[in-house]
Amino acid sequence: MLTINQITENKEAAIKGLEKKHFPQAAECIEQAISYNEKRKAAQTELDKNLAEQNKTAKTIGLLMKEGKKAEAEQAKQEVALLKEQSKKLQEDKDQAEKQLQELLYTIPNLPYDEVPEGTSAEDNVVVKMGGMETQLPENALPHWELAKKYNLIDFDLGVKISGAGFPVYIGQGARLQRALINFFLDEARKAGYTEIMPPTVVNAASGYGTGQLPDKEGQMYHCEVDDLYLIPTAEVPVTNIYRDTILDEAKLPIKNCAYTQCFRREAGSYGKDVRGLNRLHEFSKVEIVRIDTPEHSRESHQEMLDHVEGLLQKLELPYRILRLCGGDMSFTSSICYDFEVYSEAQKRWLEVSSVSNFDTYQANRMHCRYRKDGKKITLCHTLNGSALALPRIVAAILEDFQTPEGIRMPKALIPYTGFEMIQ
């Protein structure tokens, strides 16, 4: 969440940033946050004065008793009792203001960086780079859901039988392709210096609040109500929360972690052609990269992460483009975000396969993730993460873009992992 200093030190910049994200009633929320903070500070000031007076008066009681001034001592006791009651009320006022401020800050999104473009939707995102080879498909090329059926790679109907729509069953070479991609992505991450983590796939509410999924995205998360646990929408949540309530050594930053997990998203309200086959699932596999860094180095880290994801797509020989998201299309928690999309030649559309974000101090402030700067001052870290990569649409693009009359060829980089060159 935003720090109160971000709001109070430059109120107009905070309002302008929220307006770029098209956050409703930006000015009203900022003014309300300032009001709650002023109430908190005023209560704290009065409380400190009251406690000081209370301690001062309490010290006189013993002296008055020694001097035999019982009446004055009794009067002092009554004054201390009154001060205690006043202090109790001031503490309640302070706690209430802090609670109101905290609850409000949870609902306010992160501020975008200056280079984030203006815009309201995906149509306003800026294409910053395109790459990859043009694909030439055979006549009557098929979309991936028909290829999956033709080669017995994925059974969508069986997934419906077992769980419901959006839970595919991978079979034979389809399952091997999944496992090959997971291992390929993890190996590439390890080569780039990331430490592999195998985290839980359920998290508590504190973890959801730490990375900003709660209270913003509870409608998209599967909730185990009896235990108050959530199925993770991404490995970002458990991996980043490893560093919740910690003070890190500056010399160990940036921390670089990667993780493969299953991911779960309810995707409520998703219908139509855009959700056919693997385009949008409730359960899917993904490899995530996460960094914890210093403010001075986080932009460099972000660029390194972008380069890493681009390198994966180049090795998979897929046509891709990189987009800088506009304010209206960015996530609640991001300061800046780039999306990677691959082109599905058979569907004639771009498919998002990765988002790589810098969250500045927003998540770190929620998690109390800090480091000791220069061995002295305790400072908030910056957090970053990105998909490297999400599998479903990568699989869809590989099946569609590499189909031939003889079968579906594998990208060269994957053959050591699949153990086969063609799906036939």
Image (tube, grey):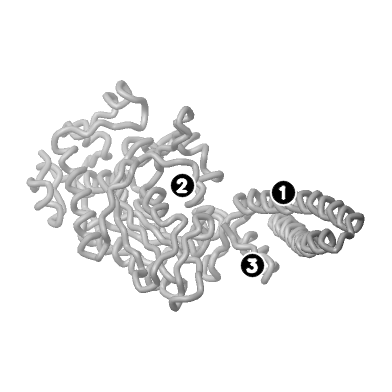
Badge 3: residue crowd in 10 Å (few <14, some 14–19, many ≥20): few
Residue 7, image quadrant: bottom right
Query: Mark 1 belongs to which amino acid?
Result: Gln
User: Foreground residue, 376 or 206?
Assistant: 376
The residue under the point 31% across, 58% down is 257
Q: How far across and down, in percent of the image, does residue 380 sit? A: 50, 66
Q: Is residue 220 above or below residue 32?
A: above
User: Foreground residue, 326 or 140?
Assistant: 326
Q: Which residue is mark 1?
A: 96
**The N terminus sits in image quarter:** bottom right
SS at circle 2: helix
Left or right of 130? Residue 170 is left
Query: Mark 2 belongs to which amino acid?
Result: Ser
Residue 204, image quadrant: top left
Query: Mark 3 belongs to which amino acid?
Result: Asn
SS at circle 1: helix
Q: Which residue is mark 2?
A: 207
Between the residue at mark 1 and the residue at mark 2, the CA separation in whole angstroms equals: 24 Å
Q: Which residue is mark 3?
A: 5
